[in-house]
Image: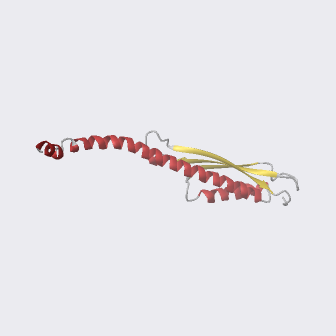
Amino acid sequence: MSVLRTIVRDERGDVEDIPGLAIVLIGILCPLIAVGIFMGRYGLADNTVQSAAAAAARDASLSGSATDAVPHAKAAAELALSGNVNCQSLNLVIGGDGLHTALGQTGTVTATITCQIATADLAFPLIPGSLTITETAASPVDPYRQR
């Protein structure tokens, strides 16, 4: 019976092992959390930039002329990006032959958005200070709409 009491009451090693275990867990969990935050931010930014490219292509395809397409597309892209992604630099390129085709002919308008996003606030050694995300979307132009 005294051996059983000694085993049950023996608490040596419990307190001494906790700080070492905590250091190991912190050393493993902190990088995993930082990478998880980075991947979440990248996924949100990538989806938002893709949506902005689609909105820009759609607005450009609805424009009456090629000169009106760029300002309309830029406004649509900025509206789609507002709130979720803060681009340090935003570059929009409108392409495709959709606005230059003859009436009755099909065509498409493409919008390519390049957005540079700051990630320096994460302040972790292996995470870059900024990301550049480039996405392209296309939208058909109504072949019977006057241009």
Residue 123 visible: no
Extreme left residue here?
2
Residue 111 placement (x, y as % from top left): 70, 50
Extreme top residue here?
126
Q: Quadrant of residue 55?
A: bottom right
- Placement of the C terminus among the 4 image quadrants: bottom right
- Judge left or right: residue 48 versus residue 28: right
Name the residue at 46% across, 44% down. 35
Name the residue at 64% across, 54% down. 51
Residue 114 placement (x, y as % from top left): 63, 47
Q: Nearer the viewer, residue 22 or 130?
A: 22
Name the residue at 84% across, 56% down. 143
Residue 91 placement (x, y as % from top left): 64, 48
Extreme front residue here?
1
Residue 47 visible: yes
Residue 1 placement (x, y as % from top left): 12, 45
Q: Nearer the viewer, residue 136 or 93?
A: 136
Name the residue at 55% across, 52% down. 44
